[in-house]
Amino acid sequence: MEILAWLQAEPELASAERDLLGDLARGHDATSMAHHQGVPLPRMRERISRARRHARTLWRNAEAAA
C-alpha cells in the first residue's frame, strides 16, 4: 500500500502525526517544516521521531494482523 494512502486510512494516527508524516512523504524536510510551523528545529526533529516510531508500531501491528 502506498504510504500516503496508508497515512489517510490508519485510524490510530493522530491528525498532527498524519499531517507531519504526510509532509515528509511529499518530500519536505525537518528544516522547512520547522520554519513553516515556527518551531525550533530540535523540537521538529523530536516530533518527527515520535510520529515515525508510532507509525512503525502501527504498521507492524497491521502486518501481523494480516
Image: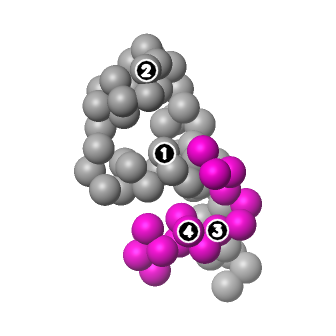
Disc 4 marks a residue whose amino acid type is Gln
The residue furthest bottom is 66
Residue plotted at (51% across, 50% down): 19
- Mark 3 to mark 4: distance in Å? 6 Å
Residue position marked by numbered label 4 in the rendering: 8
Q: Position of residue 25 (x, y in %)?
A: 36, 56
Mark drawn on residue 20: 1
Disc 2 marks a residue whose amino acid type is Gly
- Residues at marks 4 and 1 touching, judged by CB atoms closer than 8 Å: no
- Mark 2 to mark 3: distance in Å? 27 Å
Disc 1 marks a residue whose amino acid type is Leu
> What stretch of residues is rendered in magenta?
1-16
User: Is residue 31 in view from this perspective?
Assistant: yes
Residue position marked by numbered label 3 in the rendering: 10
Q: Earlier in the sequence, mark 3 or mark 1?
A: 3
Task: Between residue 1 and residue 29, name the one nearer to us.
Answer: 29
Say above or below: 9 vs 20: below
Residue position marked by numbered label 2 in the rendering: 38
Disc 3 marks a residue whose amino acid type is Glu
